[in-house]
Image: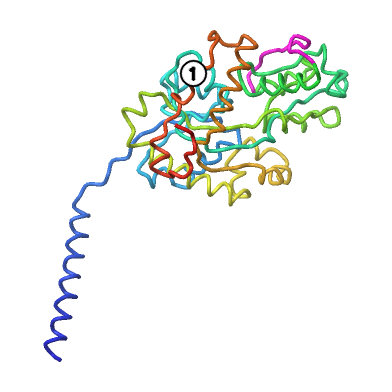
């Protein structure tokens, strides 16, 4: 009996010694150096919540990433920052990606991380004769050209059996649209939240709103250039893990998330929280993304907004390996 007890104690001592040796060895190893990463993001847009949360909640740091977020007012501007080499990764909706691909830019979608169909629309002024959708005919409409705002406006006009040539589109930066409408430079504007909410608040009863819910679904993505996916492929799964954590936090914590987004913090809190269930936070690479790309490309060709007259093979613009490693079931692109 005593011999058996001694054997058990010897085994336990050996296991303990091996554990201590392993911990000592781990402490001797140098810490993995943090990887610097620059992300261009439209920080005014609720879709970037996962990026802001990943930084504020320490998810990037937990993945060994030292992230700098460059703020921009649109996905179009974020895309340009990536193209210009000012950022490694950008947060971009579908249309700027389509334009980049049609211009031959080797853009790569790492993942879609946000979707919603209820954040685009048109705001008009009653005192300028904008009372119904049909009354937009002949009006001056502010829009950020080459963005989802212009696409939403075109589709909306088409529903009213109007052509884009039957209105005067005036190009503004997203953050300039509200002032242009308030000053009366335009009769209406087309855009997205939170800018639309701020305009409704500014104009009060003078504002007339038309929803773009059926016209456009916002599909927000993490993008880079092909060189990044080649030279820094090992960083991408770590980035996606952090964004996945940020997405989960935003999904579950709207009251805590709203103050992280200054533009939404200025709006009516109850309205923002009421809209939150319509936001889908989460990583995916779905076949519907490619179908949306093709649809937007045909729109660009039809309206002569792109030099190319052919729809590209957008599968070439999707990087499958990163999300395939992090969450393979979320990759449903046919390839």
Question: Residue tagged by mark 1?
Answer: 101
- Mark 1 Cα-neighbour bin, 10 Å: few <14, some 14–19, many ≥20: many
Q: Give the magenta range.
A: 162-174
Q: Position of residue 30 (x, y in %)?
A: 22, 47
Q: Position of residue 216 (x, y in %)?
A: 67, 29
**Which residue is at a point 63% across and 19% down the rendered structure image?**
173
Q: Position of residue 243 (x, y in %)?
A: 47, 42
In the rendered image, the quadrant that contains the N terminus is bottom left
Numbered label tally: 1
Whether residue 304 is situated above or below residue 113 in the rendered picture: above
Q: Secondary structure at mark 1?
A: helix
In the rendered image, the quadrant that contains the C terminus is top left
Q: Position of residue 254 (x, y in %)?
A: 62, 48
Farthest residue, direction left? 3
Whether residue 271 is situated above or below residue 69 in the rendered picture: below
Whether residue 50 is situated above or below residue 188 in the rendered picture: below
- Left or right of 159, for residue 301: left
Viewer-closest of 124 and 108: 108
**Which residue is at a point 18% across and 56% down the rendered structure image?**
25
């Amino acid at each position: 009996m005593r011999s058996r007890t001694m054997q058990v104690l010897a085994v336990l001592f050996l296991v303990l010694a091996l554990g201590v040796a392993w911990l000592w060895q781990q402490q001797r190893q140098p810490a993995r150096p943090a990887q610097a990463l620059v992300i261009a993001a439209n920080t005014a847009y609720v879709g970037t919540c996962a990026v802001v949360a990943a930084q504020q909640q320490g998810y990037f740091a937990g993945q060994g990433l030292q992230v700098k977020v460059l703020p921009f007012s649109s996905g179009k501007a974020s895309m340009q920052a990536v193209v210009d080499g000012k950022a490694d990764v950008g947060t971009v909706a579908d249309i700027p990606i389509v334009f980049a691909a049609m211009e031959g830019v080797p853009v790569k979608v790492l993942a879609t991380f946000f979707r919603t169909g209820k954040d685009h629309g048109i705001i008009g002024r009653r005192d300028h004769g904008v009372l119904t959708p049909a009354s937009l005919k002949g009006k001056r409409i502010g829009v950020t050209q080459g963005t989802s705002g212009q696409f939403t406006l075109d589709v909306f006009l088409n529903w009213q059996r109007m052509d884009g040539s039957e209105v005067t589109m005036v190009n503004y930066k997203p953050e300039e649209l509200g002032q242009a409408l308030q000053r009366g430079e335009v009769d209406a504007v087309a855009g997205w939240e939170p800018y639309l909410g701020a305009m409704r608040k500014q104009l009060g009863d003078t504002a007339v709103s038309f929803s773009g819910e059926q016209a456009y679904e916002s599909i927000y993505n993490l993008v880079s250039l092909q060189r990044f996916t080649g030279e820094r492929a090992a960083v991408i799964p770590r980035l996606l893990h952090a964004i996945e954590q940020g997405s989960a936090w935003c999904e579950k914590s709207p009251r805590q998330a709203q103050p992280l987004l200054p533009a939404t913090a200025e709006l009516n809190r109850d309205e923002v929280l009421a809209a939150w269930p319509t936001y889908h936070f989460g990583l995916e690479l779905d076949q519907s993304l490619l179908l949306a790309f093709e649809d937007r490309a045909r729109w660009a060709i039809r309206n002569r907004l792109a030099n190319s007259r052919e729809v590209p093979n957008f599968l070439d613009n999707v990087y499958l390996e990163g999300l395939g490693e992090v969450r393979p079931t979320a990759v449903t692109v046919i390839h």
